[in-house]
Amino acid sequence: MIKTNNFISIRQLLTLSGIFLMISITAGVSHAQRGGFPGQGDFQGRGGFPGQGGISISTKDGVASFLGEGEIYQKEIELTTDLKKVLKEKVWWEPQESSIKVYYSKTQNGAVDAYVFVFSEILQRCGGTHKYCIKVSSKGQVEGVKFLELNCHHSFGINSESFLNQFKSMNATNADTVRIDAVTRVTLSANLTYWVVRRTMVLFDVVKGQAKS
C-alpha cells in the first residue's frame, strides 16, 4: 500500500515528465494551478482493476438513473464574473462558458429534491474521455458519482464502487477537508475526479438558490 501526504495538483499533473493533461469541459476549461489538495490529509493508494473495460452511457440515461423516470427539470446557471473568481480560488477552475446546465427533480410538494451535474473532460495522455454524472441532494450531500463515459484504458480502474462511493461522505460544508482514498494505478484520474466533485460542491451553493422553476 502506498501512502503520501496529499494529492498532486492539476498543474503538477500537467507538468509531469511525459504526461500532459488537457481538460475539455462542457462548461468551460480548467486552468492549472499549483499546490496539493487543500486540507486533504493522508492519501491511501489502492490496487487498480486492469480487467475493467470502457463505459458509454447517454446523458439522458445517466441523469434518469439518479433522478428517476419522473419529470426532470433543467436550468442554465449563469457563471458570473464573481462566481468564476470563486471557482478559480477554491477549485482552480476557470470556465470559459457563460453558463452551465444543471438537472434536478422535485418532490410532490414542488420543492427541489436533488440535483445532477454533468462534466466531460479529456485525458490527453491517452485521448480518453472522463464524463462524470454527480448527484447532490437538496441539502448539499453528495449522493452518487458515476461515469457516463470512460474510454481510456489507463483509467478503467477508477470505475470502482469502493472509490466512487467515498464521495458520498462529502457535502457542502466538509468538501475541502474530507479524506478520499485513491486507486494507485490510476492516480491521474483519481485527482481529476476529486477536483470535479469539489467543483460540483461550489456550484451547488449557487444552484440551490436558483433552480426553483
Image (spheres, grey):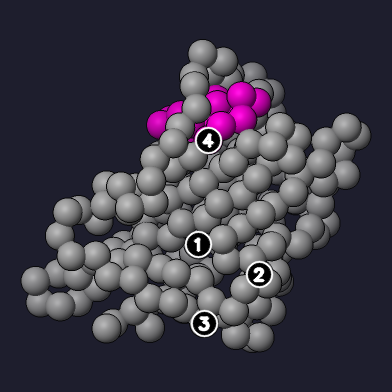
Q: CA distance from mark 2 to mark 3?
A: 11 Å
**Residue 150 disc label:** 4
Can you give x and y, in whole percent of width and height, for residue 63 in the image?
A: 32, 53
The amino acid at mark 3 is Glu
CB contact under 8 Å: marks 1 and 4:
no
Labelled disc at residue 78: 3
Query: What residue is at 70 percent from the left and 60 percent from the top?
Result: 30
Pick whichever, 75 or 196, lies toward us: 75
Residue under label 1, please give it: 200
Q: Is residue 71 above or below residue 44?
A: below
User: Contact, CB < 8 Å: mark 2 with mark 3?
Assistant: no
Vertical placement of 120 versus 136: above or below? above
The boundaries of the magenta stretch are 150-163
Residue 161 is inside the magenta segment: yes
On residue 95, the disc is 2
* Secondary structure beneath label 2: loop
Residue farthest to the left, as pictured: 108
CB contact under 8 Å: marks 1 and 2: no
